[in-house]
Image (cartoon, rainbow, N blue to C red):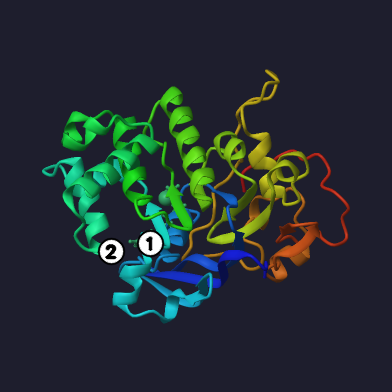
Amino acid sequence: MMADAVLSVEDLIVQYDTASGPARAVDRVSFTLGQGERLGLIGESGSGKTTMGTALMRLTRAPGRIVGGRVMLGGTDIMALSQRDLRAVRLRDIAMIPQGAMSSLNPVLRIRVQIEDAIHAHEGRLPKPEMAARIATLLTRVGLDPVVADRFPHELSGGMKQRTVMAIATALSPKVIVADEPTSALDVVVQRQVMQTLGRLQSGLGAAVVLIGHDMGLIAQFADTVGVMYAGRLVEIGPVAQMIAAPRHPYTRLLIDSLPGIDAKRRLTGIPGLPPRLTDMPPGCAFAPRCPLATASCTASIPALQTVASGHRAACHLYPGLPALPPLTAKAAP
Ligand SMILES: Nc1ncnc2c1ncn2[C@@H]1O[C@H](COP(=O)(O)OP(=O)(O)OP(=O)(O)O)[C@@H](O)[C@H]1O
Ligand SMILES: [Mg+2]
């Protein structure tokens, strides 16, 4: 475990009990987040990113439940907290910008009231001028005019709403911010601006950020470290430059190759085939059925996340035998 880890996750398992059986949407995920670190978490739709992010704050709702593992926020064991202590920790120590956050703003309350509510819950009532000044600072910090405080959500653009949600999430200067696809509903220009604001907020607060997304380009511009999820499992995690230049997991390689590049010849092809159903996981490595390099050992056991280079881990049976990944051609759909 990293000495200055602000968040450490060990063998986290989150399961949905569904009609077709238990689905492990997060399956033994472990990672640590250093102070001020920016971790980008990427994976296809349904790979378990939101389930993981939500579980970090123990906000998992039925039919989902956390069935195993540990989440340590600094020295605090999140799993051991009472509901009351959990409420105190949320927002103050760890805050979430949920997926589709824009629509989570209360439509009938002015922005000012929504920010006040967040602060009141933790600090009690503040004198009016102090509260007004605080709200103005929070809004300015996310690039909004303080007059926004007196508006209703429907009077704001998508980008402004997203910034408002960021102002609320950071109202108590949390040490960890989990941002779940904060720009997915925005156009490309606004996306970039909101990401810059998130970056400035992060460095201003010295907070660590878990940025969830499926756009490797956007994630790579922001993150120090990139983690890749596949069918509920963390299959690779490492420094962003290494992850782009020398990914070790075949899935990461194909994911990066499928990005539209500067090279016009590289087409956005995607990876043939589909991720497995969580209620019907293949034996061994979940990616084996789509992996061009799969061998018999890949279906025999689930590969553990192991160190492949400094600060870089991959869950793949090719290692430690393989020094680097050869060029890959995606396998035809199984
Ligand atoms: N309430 C639920 N009941 C049953 N299964 C669920 C529930 N919520 C999520 N799942 C399943 O858990 C898996 C992971 O879902 P999750 O929302 O975490 O994925 P994600 O990576 O965030 O996807 P996206 O990129 O689309 O947001 C999916 O297979 C999904 O079908
Ligand atoms: Mg999601």
Q: Which residue is drawn at 33% across and 40% down?
A: 137
Q: State which quarter of the image contains the N terminus.
A: bottom right
**How far across and how far down the image is residue 99, in percent?**
37, 47
Q: Is mark 1 on a helix, strand or loop?
A: loop
Farthest residue, direction top: 264
Q: Which of 318 and 297 is in front in this view?
A: 318
Can you see residue 192? yes
Can you see residue 213? no
- Residue beneath disc 1: 92
In this rendering, the answer to whether 300 lies above or below 45 is below
Q: Earlier in the sequence, mark 2 or mark 1?
A: 1
Q: Which mark is residue 221?
A: none
For the residue marked with disc 2, what is the amino acid? His
In this rendering, the answer to whether 83 lies above or below 237 is below
Give the image quarter of residue 153.
top left
Q: Nearer the viewer, residue 24 or 331?
A: 24
Q: Residue at x 47, y 40 (%)?
A: 198
Q: In this view, does 47 lie to the left or right of 108?
A: right
In this rendering, the answer to whether 327 lies above or below 178 is above
Q: Which mark is residue 122?
A: 2
